[in-house]
Image (spheres, coloured by chain):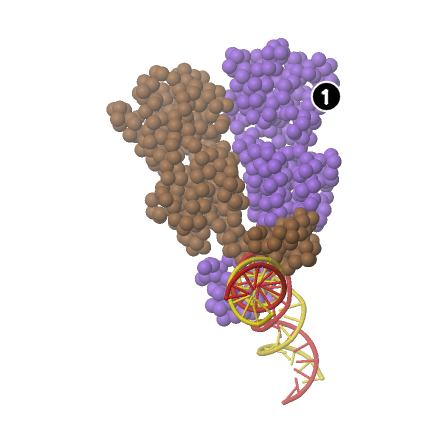
Chain colours: A purple, B brown, C red, D yellow
DNA sequence: AGATTAATTGTAAGCGCTTCAATAAAACTC
DNA sequence: GAGTTTTATTGAAGCGCTTACAATTAATCT
């Protein structure tokens, strides 16, 4: 049987309220007793019961994180950042992997509600009205990471996807490439799909290369799809000398495809990725990519949620973090 | 303000105990009232408070998972499996990333204790006496995944590391390789280090290749270390035509190093990895590797913990799952 | 010394829920 | 139809904790 505050009180020969006070306001209890109590706590390995506390404070000191795909290194980085932030802010973290399943996400929200999480971070998924309604319905505060909402005023942390994509494509153009394709995210189910496409088009337009603007195939988050997309893309446009991929995993898929066709990267085709996953410097060739501050995004999201929870508000609703082009080996001058 | 059972009772014109019963034993309340209550629950979006429940049941229906490194795809797979199991068993999951930091792990245990998790899964780390003592001290049941304990009788789920390593090296030998090196885990801080080394040595011995048995370097979980280890290994033993790596990430590091030295894989050197991460079929060349049933390991660990929690015991203390050699492109006949 | 004030401690209510004993209502018996 | 059993419902206690408030003790002031 776990020791309770009563057991501690009994052992230290004080009342339970005194024990409670040494835990919550130590300087209001006289030293001799305080020491006795602390010794008893020590001896009994006493840990206050979070249920009882939660019942009173109506707070769980727990945050929830909803992520679409835990086997994506991107989210692993976000989690790590968020968890570190949670430690320093005094929260526990409950991570739920939705596998991009709407129903599952919704049921996780119910679960979070029941477990009384103080707030939720929703990662990289569109904020569908169903999500919003449910979250609003149980009035759990939440923030978005690697995402934002145009319909609702929800605090968010992300990078400037349009600008990041622009930078990547611009880099390719400066390298002398004139025939540039793209492997993008589906516009329907992603938040970053459209802005990255816009960045692609803007860079092309500025340099009079609009003829490339439909040399695009879409893939669905995973390597295999990107491989397939690359296949279709290069089949339709064998003239391409460069591809902008909106995810490192897509870049790997594309390179893998090109390799299987004996097309050299970067010898014949340059590939730029996106995210700067840990893997991207392990791949052969090492990926040129747009780095997102992944860890920091997660860290910041937790901080922002904390801000929302404690002050009821946030200083900046939509927060943009810096991206940065990292040039490695998968790109070359034309 | 969140609605409580009182609000539901008031709205449905019944007592709170009736409301409680429609949630826990619906058939003991007459239909007319039951319907009224359910409507009220619906209307108020009522969710019972897990704190209050936990206080009574002394159960949180939450499991804790302690993992060393969330940015390792291996653990991502374990998490996914474990979470799926948790869903079907009715648990929530609290994942904590220790970053291989002992202090941090210990403090997570405290946290789990306070939050009253029902049980803990400890992934892939050695069960140091400090861990055991703390866990035993707060009497939280736990199981080990991808690990086991010789000192204590703790339920565990893992593969047969010795046999798996043996199979990998044996495969290399059958391919005709006679000069075989290894990049292994440190024996001090890993559970699987020694048995995988033993498997390596056994395969060598059986074929009269014991002269290779010290052609080993150790690396510390990450790609970069493996790169460095490969550098040292090939510097000392330029005659090697094959390397057995105890992790796919090591294999990638080794291949990366060889690539930088213009040594062809598999043309000149064959490399076998371990784990069969999702990445291993994305890499170039695709990795020949020993597959672990990663997802299943996580799934099974949760089931085993559940078994321990409900029956107070487990059928088989140390459970071994099947491994399997997957031949892809990083290995070739000599 | 007696009265006032300050510091410390204890008592008890209550957070939201479950559950058992008690009550009320309905359904049987003979 | 009085007595008994069965069924349905409710009131109240209590899970482990915090905290207002009351009670006690110590300290300070006339």
Question: At 48% from the left edge and 41% from the top edge, which residue is drawn?
Answer: B67
Q: Position of residue B103 (x, y in %)?
A: 47, 48
Question: At 57% from the left edge and 58% from the top edge, which residue is drawn?
Answer: A52
Instruction: Name the side, left or right, on which B142 lies relative to A258.
Output: left
Question: At 34% from the left edge and 27% from the top edge, which residue is drawn?
Answer: B167
Q: Is residue A273 above or below residue A97?
A: above
Nearer-the-camera pick, B270 or A4? A4
Callout 1 secondary element: helix
Is residue A298 visible in this depiction of the protein? no
Residue at image mark 1: A202
Q: Quadrant of residue A80?
A: top right
Q: Position of residue B211 (x, y in %)?
A: 28, 25
Q: Is residue B304 above or below residue B136?
A: above
Q: Position of residue B182 (x, y in %)?
A: 36, 28
Nearer-the-camera pick, B284 or B276? B276
Q: Position of residue B205 (x, y in %)?
A: 26, 27
Q: Is residue A252 above or below residue B34?
A: above
Which image quarter is the N terminus of chain A in? bottom left
Instruction: Name the side, left or right, on which B132 lies relative to A72.
Output: left
Which image quarter is the C terminus of chain A in? top right
Is residue B140 visible in this depiction of the protein? yes
Q: Quadrant of residue C8?
A: bottom right
């Amino acid at each position: 049987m776990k020791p309770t505050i009563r057991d501690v009180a009994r052992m230290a020969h004080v009342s339970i309220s005194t024990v409670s006070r040494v835990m919550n306001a130590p300087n209001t209890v006289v030293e001799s007793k305080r020491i006795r109590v602390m010794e008893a706590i020590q001896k009994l390995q006493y840990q206050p019961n979070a249920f009882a506390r939660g019942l009173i404070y109506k707070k769980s000191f727990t945050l929830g994180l909803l992520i679409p795909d835990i086997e994506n290194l991107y989210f692993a980085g976000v989690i790590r950042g968020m968890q570190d932030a949670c430690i320093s802010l005094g929260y526990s973290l409950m991570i739920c992997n939705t596998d991009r399943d709407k129903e599952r996400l919704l049921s996780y929200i119910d679960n979070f509600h029941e477990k009384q999480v103080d707030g939720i971070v929703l990662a990289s998924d569109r904020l569908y009205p169903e999500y919003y309604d449910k979250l609003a319905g149980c009035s759990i505060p939440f923030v978005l990471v690697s995402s934002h909402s145009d319909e609702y005023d929800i605090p968010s942390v992300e990078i400037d996807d349009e600008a990041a994509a622009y930078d990547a494509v611009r880099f390719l153009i400066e390298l002398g490439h004139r025939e540039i394709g793209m492997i993008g995210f589906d516009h329907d189910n992603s938040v970053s799909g459209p802005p990255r496409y816009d960045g692609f088009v803007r860079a092309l337009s500025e340099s009079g290369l609009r003829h490339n603007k439909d040399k695009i195939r879409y893939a669905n988050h995973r390597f295999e799809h990107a491989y397939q997309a690359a296949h279709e893309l290069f089949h339709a446009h064998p003239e391409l000398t460069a591809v902008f991929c909106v995810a490192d995993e897509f870049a790997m898929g594309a390179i893998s495809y090109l390799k299987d066709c004996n097309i050299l990267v970067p010898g014949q085709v340059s590939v730029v990725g996106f995210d700067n996953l840990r893997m991207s410097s392990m791949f052969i060739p090492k990926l040129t990519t747009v780095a997102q501050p992944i860890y920091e995004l997660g860290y910041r999201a937790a901080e922002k949620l904390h801000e929302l929870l404690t002050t009821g508000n946030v200083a900046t609703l939509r927060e943009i973090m810096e991206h940065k082009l990292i040039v490695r080996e998968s790109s070359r001058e034309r």
